[in-house]
Image (cartoon, rainbow, N blue to C red):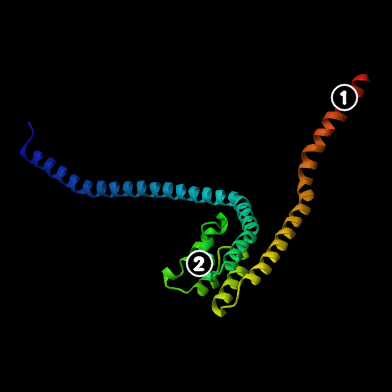
Amino acid sequence: MLSFETLLGALIGCGWGALIAVPIFTRANKSAARSRAQVMEQKESSRRKRSIESVAFIRVLGVPARRRASRTMENAVSRDIPVLIDLLALAAASGCTPAGSVAAVTKWAPPTVSAWCTDLASASDRGITFASACESPPPHRDLIALGATLAASARSGAPIRSALQRLAESSRIATRQQAEARARAVPIRLLFPLVCTILPAFGLLTLAPVVLGALAGH
């Protein structure tokens, strides 16, 4: 049987071993937790980086589509402005003021410019004058001249019908010139499909059989 001194020494040794082991295990657990946190942070950082890169890549890919959509919208506004000016001139000919003309044509304005007309018609509800609303930057640059004409007539009280007729004529001329410029650019745009698709297909369908027949005859 073990003596009392041996048992006491073993108990004391176990106690000291436990006192020494506790800080070691605590530090090991903290180190493991820090390692796991660092690994998770690295994974999260890598995931965020991939997400940012993918979003940037998608944005870069979407630039041509956004530019085409912007050009399409600008062309639609340019085509609809003469129609809007004619409606305003008709309302002015019936005796409406500039603000009354805009309010009268809001319902019948083309969809591309109806929001702008609605914004001008509701200017008084927002506590600003009609002239100030017309002078504020419009959503499309082609509406700047029309807004300036409406503002000038509203401030001076001068008849607006003749000014609108001149503006409508100049808008139609500008629209026709833009259409002619786009038509002149069509042959240049057709060069790529012509060179890269039509000419190679023509060569494969016409020249390739002749060359293969000649080679087979030899």
- Residue 61 at what x, y percent from top left? 60, 49
Element at badge 1? helix
The residues bearing labels 1 and 2 have C-alpha atoms spaced at a distance of 72 Å
Q: 91 or 142: which is nearer to us?
A: 91
Q: 1 or 110: which is nearer to us?
A: 110
**Which of the two labelled residues, at mark 1 and mark 2, occupies the earlier sequence position?**
2
Identified by mark 1, the residue type is Leu
Residue 120 is tagged as: 2
Residue 82, quarter of the rendered image: bottom right
Direction from residue 62 to residue 25 in the image, left or right: left
Residue at left 57%, top 65%?
91
Label 1 with label 2: CB-CB less than 8 Å: no
In the rendered image, the vertical position of residue 84 relative to residue 39, given as above or below:
below
Residue at left 86%, top 25%?
209
- Residue 26 at what x, y percent from top left? 25, 48
Question: Which residue is situated farthest in the left direction here?
Answer: 4
Mark 1 = which residue? 212
Question: Could you tell me which quadrant the N terminus lies in?
Answer: top left
Question: Could you tell me which quadrant the C terminus lies in?
Answer: top right
Q: For label 2, count other residues whose C-alpha is less than 10 Å away and answer few (under 14), some (14-19) or many (20+).
A: many
Residue 134, quarter of the rendered image: bottom right
Identified by mark 2, the residue type is Leu
Question: Which residue is situated farthest in the top direction here?
Answer: 217
Direction from residue 109 to residue 176 in the image, left or right: right
Question: Which residue is situated farthest in the bottom direction here?
Answer: 156
Direction from residue 27 to residue 167 in the image, left or right: right
Q: For label 1, count other residues whose C-alpha is less than 10 Å away and answer few (under 14), some (14-19) or many (20+).
A: few
